[in-house]
Amino acid sequence: NAGVMQNPRHLVRRRGQEARLRCSPMKGHSHVYWYRQLPEEGLKFMVYLQKENIIDESGMPKERFSAEFPKEGPSILRIQQVVRGDSAAYFCASSPKTGIDGYTFGSGTRLTVV
Amino acid sequence: QKEVEQNSGPLSVPEGAIASLNCTYSDRGSQSFFWYRQYSGKSPELIMSIYSNGDKEDGRFTAQLNKASQYVSLLIRDSQPSDSATYLCAFADSNYQLIWGAGTKLIIKP
């Protein structure tokens, strides 16, 4: 029973390029959450999605960032025109119908912008 | 504003002693509370969940919940160097989204 799968594990992008981060939730989980974490800092909520719907994007920067969770395939977090400040660990988590029993996290994607 | 307060630490505990981690939360309506452990460079891992007042034990870990005081704690008995990590407290709000504390860094000294 595979857990939450994130890829790539490490991603290096030059300033101005696009970054695409992928997340496949656990089998049977229909809710996906994206978080960003800077070194030595806490988790920062970005966005909460269900299939084909964005439920809460209150943590997403207004520009350059977008997320989707299509009917088929993984959830995608997309960062356009990356800047050095986007360098961070990006974690995806999933849950069944609700988060009442907590979330399961993927291993994360470490984005480095050079 | 839904909030979770944790002492950021670091909390230093001698090996073999009891480590006590504390957390307060703002949402009186919350029913679900969680402790996650995060090793440096790794993702958070759920170690304890608690839903009712009182204590819940799992091996060396005990979670304690006091809804009247809006307080949840985690006790780690016989602390080991491998317990050194950041411990994140979270609760599920009325929409079942998790609200997170900033985490407490725990250091177990051999």
Image (cartoon, coloured by chain):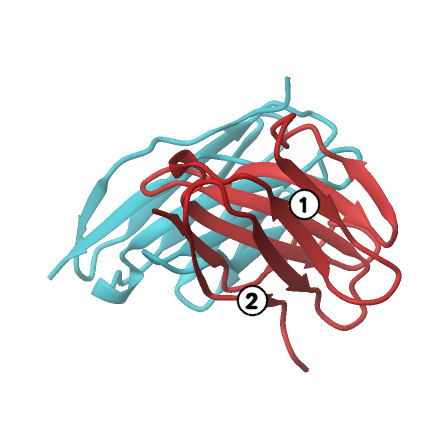
User: Residue shown at 32%/54% (left/top)?
Assistant: B85
The picture quadrant where one finds residue B2 is: top right
Chain drawn in red = A
* Both labels 1 and 2 in a single chain: no
| Residue A32 shown left or right of residue A20 in the figure | right
A104 vs B27, nearest the viewer: A104
| Residue A61 shown left or right of residue A28 in the figure | left
Within 10 Å of the Cα at label 1, are there few (<14), some (14-19), or many (20+) other Cα atoms?
Answer: some
Mark 2, secondary structure of its residue:
strand
State the mark number for residue B52.
Answer: 1
* Farthest left residue in view: B110
Q: Would you place residue A98 above or below residue B72 in this image?
A: below
**Residue B35 placement (x, y as % from top left):** 51, 50
| Residue A107 shown left or right of residue B32 in the figure | left
A20 vs B52, nearest the viewer: A20
The picture quadrant where one finds residue B25 is: top right
Query: Chain for mark 2?
Result: A
Chain drawn in cyan = B
- At label 2, the amino acid type is Asn
Mark 1 in CB contact with mark 2 (< 8 angstroms): no
Quadrant the N terminus of chain A occupies: bottom right
Task: Report the residue marked by disc 2.
Answer: A7
Of discs 1 and 2, which sits in the foreground? 2
Within 10 Å of the Cα at label 2, are there few (<14), some (14-19), or many (20+) other Cα atoms?
Answer: some
